[in-house]
Image (cartoon, coloured by chain):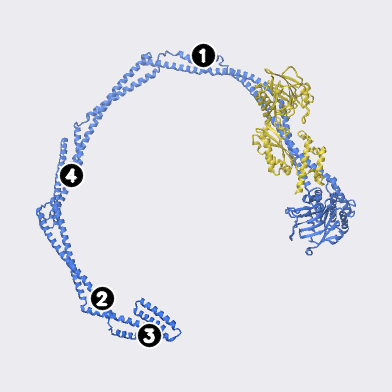
Amino acid sequence: MKLIKLHLYGFGRFQNVQIELANESIHVFLGENEAGKSTIRAFIRCILFGFPTKQQSELRYEPRLGGQYGGSIVIDTNQYGKVTVERISGKATGDVHVYFADGSIGGEAELKLVLNEVDYTIFSGIYSFGLADLQMMEQLQSDELNKFIYGVGISGRHNLLEIEKKNDKTIQVLYKPTGRKPLINQQLRKVVEADEQVNSWKKQLNNYERLMEERIELQKLLEKTSEEQHELNRSYRYFEKLQAITPLVINKKTFENRLQQLPPYIPFPEEGIERLEKLLDHSLLIVSDMKAIEKKLQKINDDKKLLNVNESLDKLEEMIERIKESRQIYETKQKEKELILQQIQYEQQEYTVMVEKLGYKDAFFATSFVAEQNLLKLVEKEATLKQKDLLLQSQLDQAKAALEEKETQVESLKKELLADHVRKELEQKLAKKQSEIELQKEIEFINDGLQLVTNQLNYFEKTEKTKKTMILVSIFASFCGAIIFFLDSQYLLGSLFVFALLLMILFSKNKHTYKTELQQQRETFLVQKEVLIKQLENIPYDDFERVQQMLKKDQQTSNQLFFKEQNLAEANEAYQLICKELDKCELDIAVFHAELANWADEFRYPLQLEATQYMKLLNMMEETKQKQRHLNYLREKLAIIETDLQEMIESVENVCKILTITFHSENYLQNVERLVIILKEAQEIEKTFQRLTDQQTELNEELKRLNVKYQQYQQEIEKLYQLANVATEEEFRVKGKAWFESQQIVAQLRIINSQLSPFIGFETELIELEEDVLLYKDLLTEKMLEVEMKSSHARDQEKKWHKQLAEINQEIKNLEQGSSYSLVLHHLETERGTLISEARKWAFHRTVQLIIDEAKKVYEKERQPQVVKEATKMFQLLTNGQYVQLYAPIGEQRFFVERNDGLTFQPNELSQGTQEQLYLAIRFALATVHSKHTSFPIFIDDIFVNFDQRRRQKAVEIMKEMAKKHQIIFFTCHPFIAKEVSNGYFLLEDRSSTN
Amino acid sequence: MKQIRFIHAADLHLDSPFQGLRDLPETIFQQIRESTFVALQKLVDYAIDQQVNFVILAGDIFDGENRSLKAQVKLKRAMEQLQQYGICCYIVHGNHDHLKGNWLSISWPENVFFFKDEVNFFEFQNDNVTVHLYGYSYPQKTVKDNIVAKYEKQGVADFHIGILHGTAEGQVGHDQYAPFSVRQLVEKDFDYWALGHIHKRQVLHKAPFVVYPGNFQGRHKKELGEKGVYLVELNDVHSLSSLTFLPTSEIYWDELTIKIDELETIDELTTCCEAALSQAKKPNHSLLVVLKFTGRGVLHQYLIEQVDEFIEIFNMDQEKKANFCYIIDKKLETIGEWDRNTLKNEQHLLSDIVSIVDKLNSEEELLLGALTEVYQHHKFKHFLPPMTKEEQKQLLLEAESYLLSALLKERDE
C-alpha cells in the first residue's frame, strides 16, 4: 500500500496544496520548523482515520485561512488499485468518500477494507511515531512498557490488563483459599453450620421412639399415685373432721348435765322478771306525779282569791275608746275655729273698703240682668257716634285746605298770560321770515344755470374738431340733467335743460346760432339774479328765534289755566257735601243722650254720667254685694264648730263622774290620758284571773287520768303472778332466776349443735362420730401427721413425674411438628443455594481469568517471540552487533537485552540513544510482524537526533530495508539527514516563502 | 358395569426444600416451605370432592431418608381426614423414602396400606367391585434390579393395578432405579400402572394406562409448569376409562425467554419482561421465574453489566403480594453486536480469545482444572454439585461474551 498524492483542501496553514509523493519507497519531507511537517502527518492521520472530535485533546487543524476543511489522499493498493480517499467536514469525524478505480464510491466501511483493518490505535501504536513517542516509551516503567506493547500489539491500549485486574479483584472478593471474609468462604461457613444443625436434628429424631415409651410409663405411674393420694386425702380429711368437732362434743355433754341439775323453772312467763320490774317502776312514777299536781291546785286557788276584778269593764272600755278616738277631732276643730275667726276679720275690712270706693253711701243700684244688657247696648251706640263725629270733622278740614290752594294756583296762572295785541305782532314777524328763505334758494338755482351756460360757451371756443361729439355729449348731458331735474320736481331747472337741449339740437344743425343763443341766455340769468338779490335786501332782519319761543310758551300757559279752573270747581263741590253730613251727626247725638238719661232714671243711678261710667258703677255694686254674702256664711260656720266642741267636753266630764275622778275642765286632753291609763289597769287584772282559772281546769283533768293508769298497772302485776303460779313477788323472783339459767344452757346446746351440723350428713353419723371422738381423742394429731407425711411424699413424686412428662411431651411435640427440623432443612437448602450461586459467579470470573491467561500465553508464545525475534535482528544491526539478544521471558512480561559480552540489561539501564534504538527496533519489528498480510506505510518523524552517525546510517539502512515492503514517509528538519535517507525529497517551504 | 375411581400421585417429596433459592424475602420463603403441604391438602380435597374409592401414592412421599416428623405427621393427618370419608390409601416407598431410612414409628390409621420390600398385593373391595393393588417398596436407596418381573396377577378381581417406583426406559436425567420397559408392563395385562420416580408428567401407554403423574409441586427451576395428580376412572369397558389431570401446585416454576434482538432501550426491555411475566402468571398461583435472555442486540452490554439490578427492581415488593411473581434466576445467552467468525479471522486479541474459548470448549480438563480450587475442594464437595457439561459451555459462553464486550467497548470509545 502506498500513498501517491496528497491534496490538502484546507488543513492548518495549507490551503489547496497538492503534493505528489515520490515514486521511491522512501519519501522525505524536509522542512524547517513550522514549515508544516506535523501538519502533513496530522493530515494523513485525519483523512485516513477521521478528524478528532471536539471532545478529544488532539488538534483539529481546521483551516485558518478559510477553504474547505479536509482533503484527499490517493492510495495505491494491491487489492483495489488506485483509490482516492476524501474526507471533508460533516459528522464529528468528517464525511469520507472512497473513490475506487472502477468508479464506485464507498464510505467508512469501504475505507476500513482499503486500510486492511488497520485502525487508529494500531496506526498510532505501530505505524506512526516520532522522537517524542520513542522518548515517551523510555520514560515508561518496564512493566508499563510491556503493557503498552501488549496493548498495542493485541488490541486497544491497556484494557485487557484492566479487565484482568478487575476480574482478579472480584475473584478475591468472592473466594480466597485461606480467608474468612470472602463471600464464598463466609457462605461455606453458613452452609456447614446449617448442615451441622440438620445433623444434630437427625440425632434428636432417633430419640422419638424412646420418648414415646417413656411417656406411656410415666402416664401409668402418674395414674397410680393419683389413686393413692386420693385415699390418703380421704382419711386425712376424716381425722381433720374429728379434730374439728372434738371440743364441741365435750362441751355438749357438760351442758346437758347442768340442765338436769336445775330446780323447777316451769311454768314461767316469757321475760317475767323484766316485765314485773317495768310495771313496778311505772306505778311508782304515777303516784309521785299525782302528788305534785295536787300541790299546784292549792296554790292557784290562793292566788285567785287575791285578785279584784271590775265587773262593768266592757262598757267602760267602749266609752273610753270613743273619747280616745275623738281626741284628734277635738284638736282639728279647735284649729278650724281659729282660722274662721281670722277670715271673718279680713273679709269685714275688705267690705268696708269697697263701700267707701263706691262713693254713694247706702246706695243700692240695680244690677239686674236687664239693666246690664241695656247698658251694654247704650255703651256701643255711644262709641259709634263719637267715632263718626270725629271722622267728619277731619274731612271738613281737608276739603277746606284743598279749596284754598286751587284758588291761589288759578290766580297766578292768569297773571302769566300774554296780552292779545302782543301776540298778533309776533305772528306777523314770523310770516315774513318764511319768504326770505325762498328767495335765497332761487338765486342759487340761477347761479347754477349761469355756470352751465358759461361752460358750454368755453367749450365751443376751444375746439372745432370735437364739436360734433361735444354737442352730442352736451345734448346727452342736458337731456340727462333735464330728466334728473324733472324727476326731482325742479321744473325750472329741468325746463332750462330742455331748453338747452333744444338749443344744442339746433346748434348741431346750426352751430353759429346755438352759440348766440347761449350768450343770450346767459344774459337773462344775470338779470334775474340781480332782481332777486334786491328783493332779499328788502326784508328786515329781526330776532326770529325769540319770537318763535315766546309764542310757544304763551300757548302752553293758556292750556294749563284751563285745567286748573276745572279742578277748582270740583273742590268746592266736595266741601259743600261734607258740611251737610256733619250737621246730620250732631242731631243723632242729642237723641242718644235722652235715651241714656231714661235708663239711669229707671235703675236708680245718678244722672248726667256717660254710659261707660254707668258700666263701671254696675260692676262695683256687684262685687260689694258678693262680699256681704261671704261674710254671712263664715259667721254661720263658726257657730256650728263651737257647739261641737262643747259637746265633746261634756261627754268627758260625764265619764269622769262615773269613774269618780276629778274633772279638770280647763285641760281636756289631760283628762283623756288619765282615763286611758285607768282602763289599761282594769284590763290587766281581768286577764290574770282568766289564766289562773284555765290552769286549774287542766290540772284537775290530769289527776283523773293518772289515777286510771295506776289501777291498770296493779292489775298487770297480779296477772304475772298467776302465770308463774306464785303468790308473792319473792317467790316470783326465785322462779324467774332458775328459768333464766335454763334458757342459757339450751341456747349453748343449740349453738353447739349448729356448729356440728356441717360435719354431719345424717343423724346416725353424729352418734358414730361422737363415739369416734371419744375413741381417738388423744391419738388424733399423731395419726394426722402420719397421713400428711405419706401424702406429701406422693405429691413430690407426682410433681417430678409431671415435669418429666411435660418435657417429654414438649420434645415429642417439637419432633412431630418438626418445624425446627423442617426449618433447618429448608435453611440448609437456601444457604446451599446461595453457595452454589456464589460459586457459579466465582466460576464465571475464574473462567474469564483462565481465558485471559490463555490469551496472554498465546501472545507470548505465538506472537511476542516473533516481535522479539525481529526486534533482535534490527537492534543487532543498529548497534552494529554490540547487543546480540533481546528477549521477553514467558510469564515475566519484561524485556531484557544481552550485550555481546554476555551481560544483560533492562531497557532503562541503557543510554538514551541506545534506548531509542531499542524502541525503534521494537517498532519496526512490530510493524514487520503485524503486517504479514498488509504493507501499511510507516510514518517516521525525525527520530535520529540522538543517533551517532554510524548508527544513524545503520538505521537508515534498516529503514531502506523496511522500505522494500513498506512505503516510508520520513519527516525531518535536517537537510543532511534528508540526503542520507533519500536522494529525492520534498522540500516544505516555510510560511514566508509559501506565501 | 364395573367402575372404580381413584387418585394417582407420586413423588410428593413432602417438606423438601426448594433448590437454588437465595436471598428470598421471608414471606415468600414461608410460602415455599409450606407449598408441599398445601399441595397435599389439595390432593385430599380432590379425593373427598371426587368421592374416589382410594388414593395411590407411588413412592418418594418424603424427600430424604431423614424425613421430617412434620412431614409424617402432616401425612398422617391427611390420611385421617381421608379415613373420615372411608377413602383408603396405598403407598409404596421409593428411593427417597426407602425402608432403611430413618423411619419413625408413627401409628397410621387403618385406611393406610404400605407395601413391603417384596411385591405383594392388597385387596380393595366394596359392594360391587374388587380391586387388587400390587406394589413394592424400596428396601434401600438403590434398587438396580428390574422389579417388574416379580409382578404377577393374583386371584380374581375386577381390576388389577400395579404400583411401581422406577425409571422407564428412555427417561433421562434421573437415576436409573428399578429400570423397566413399557412393553414389559403392558405384557403383564394389568388394568393400570401407577408409576413414580420421574417428575415429569407423562402417559407412556394408553390401554392399559401406564402413567407418571410427575411430582405434585415443582421444587426447582427444572420442574417447570403446573404440577398435580391424576384422577383415574377405570371401567370394565375400556373405552370409558379416563385420566384427568388435577393441578395441586400453588407455586410453579417457569422459564421465560426474552429476546433482545428487537429491543433498544431499557424501558423496552422492562415492558417486554413485564408482558412475559403477566402472560405466564395464572390467577391464584405464585410464580418463580427463570428469565432467559437470548438474541443479539444493543442491550447485551447492559445485561452483562447490570442484569442483577434489573431483576432486583422486578422483585421489589413481591413479598407483599398475595400471589408473588419472583424472578429466581436468569440465564444470559445474549450475544453482543459482533460476528464471532469475523473476529476469529482478525489477528489480534479478540481472535485469540475466540480461539481460546473454542479450545477450552473442546478440552474440558483445562476449565475443570481451573475450577478445582473450589469445585474439588473437600469442604465444598459435599454441597456443590459438579459442573455439568452444559454448565461449562454456558460459563465459557458468558465469559467470552463478557471479555469481548469489555474489549470492544474500549475500542469503540
Position in image of residue A743 (x %, y %): 44, 17
Which mark is drawn over residue A456? none
Tell whether label 1 touches label 3 (CB within 8 Å). Answer: no
According to the picture, the residue beneath numbered tag 4 turns out to be A334
Distance in Å between CA atoms under marks 3 and 2? 53 Å
Position in image of residue A185 (x %, y %): 75, 38
Going by the numbered disc 4, the residue's amino acid type is Gln
Residue in the picture at 19% in, 70% down:
A565
Q: Colour of chain A?
A: blue
Labels 4 and 1 share a subunit: yes
According to the picture, the residue beneath numbered tag 2 turns out to be A552
Nearer to us: label 3 or label 4? 3
Q: Colour of chain B?
A: yellow
Q: Dot 4: within a 10 Å radius of its alpha carbon, few (fewer than 14), some, or many (20 or more) residues?
A: some
- Is B221 on the left-hand or right-hand side of A780? right
Provide the secondary structure element on which disc 4 rests: helix
Which mark is drawn over residue A517? 3
Going by the numbered disc 2, the residue's amino acid type is Lys
